[in-house]
Amino acid sequence: MTAFRRILVVIDPTTATQPGLERGARLAKQLGAKLELFICDYNPLLTESRALDAGAVARARAALLDSDLRRLHELAAPLQSAGLDVTVAASWDHPLHEGIVRKTVESGADIVVKDTHYHSVLKRSIFSNTDWSLIRGCPAALLLVKPRATAAKPCVVAAIDPLHERDAQASLDKRILATAVSLASALGGELQVFHAFDITPVIAASSEAMMTPIALPINEITDAMREEHTDAVHALTDEASIPRERVHIHQGGARDGLVGLTDRLRADVVVMGAVSRSGLERLFVGSTAEEVLDKLACDVLIVKARGFVTAP
């Protein structure tokens, strides 16, 4: 079981609505976790320069952070009255994602909760540069929250890829499932599991490798791939005691399959993974995450592999 004991909620000082705060508070209440509300602020007008008095700049920054702290205490007060363990913090830092990562490391947070946006007309998420940078670089689990209410008994979908080509994925899939199981249990929700396999690249590669065109045994290849993927998925889900009727194996593209499933189930959150390779500078975001993030209308929880290396 995966436990979130320290939850860091990023508060946006420019807006009155804070859906991430509601999600973070609910998690803290159900898990008995510590909750920290955090504002990372920056104003380019208050940067040091020869044209500005250093003392005046320092006082202006301090006044801005004092204002942020007052706001945070106002948000924390009703949660503290309800019995939650809530602290607040504000810092001057830039760029925003680096300030959040620094605070995550400093506080020892297990999960970072941050608002993001979904455009219902365009049917896509509107991720900021900060969101994408955190997906690639946040060392803790990252919950990106959409501005929509969640069910009293939420539907949690775990997206796994047990035949992923990278070695780190095997342990990551177990972490994804453990996190999703814990989340569904804590919130009194229901867990579903999703996996997709696509035969198209295999057929294309096989055709290109042949010197002379011949008819490929597509049905046999499809059946063999389906059996291989089904066996790999069930090996993981059986170990996690997840009923097979809640395991969805989709033939086709991951994006359309997962988006379609979450729409049908009215899912509240999708749990998926990101992996990195120690010694490499570039973070590899799992293909499923990369393809579907912008199409999901529900919250997304990004789980990191062990030995995760943050992007520079």
Image (tube, rainbow, N blue to C red):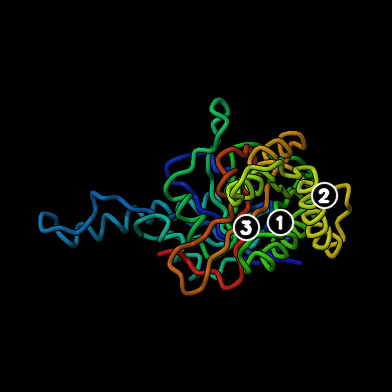
- Residue 265 at x, y percent in the picture: 77, 37
- Tell which tag, 1 or 2, sits nearer the viewer: 2
In this figure, which residue is indicated by the disc labeled 2?
Answer: 247
Q: Earlier in the sequence, mark 1 or mark 3?
A: 1
Q: Residue at x 62, y 57 (%)?
A: 273
Q: Where residue 59 sits: x, y (%)?
A: 26, 58
Quadrant of res 181: bottom right
Q: Nearer the viewer, mark 1 or mark 3?
A: 3
Q: Is residue 208 left or right of 38 when viewed as pictured?
A: right
The residue indicated by pointer 3 is 273
Q: Secondary structure at mark 1?
A: helix
x, y percentage for residue 103? 47, 65
Residue 9 falls in image quadrant: bottom right
Task: Locate the N terminus by quadrant.
Answer: bottom right
* Residue farthest to the top, as pictured: 121
1 or 2: tag closer to the N-terminus: 1
Amino acid type at mark 1 = Lys
Nearer the N terminus, badge 2 or badge 3? Answer: 2
Residue depicted at 32% across the width and 59% down the height: 62
Q: Is residue 249 above or below residue 103?
A: above
How crowded pointer 1 is (Cα within 10 Å; few <14, some 14-19, many 20+) is rated as some
Q: CA distance from mark 1 to mark 3?
A: 25 Å
For disc 2, the neighbor class at 10 Å (few under 14, some 14 to 19, many from 20) is some
Read off the residue under disc 1: 29
Q: Are marks 1 and 2 in contact (CB under 8 Å)?
A: no
Q: Name the amino acid, label 2.
A: Val
Task: Tell me the crowding category of disc 3: few under 14, some 14 to 19, or many 20 or more residues within 10 angstroms, Cα based.
Answer: many
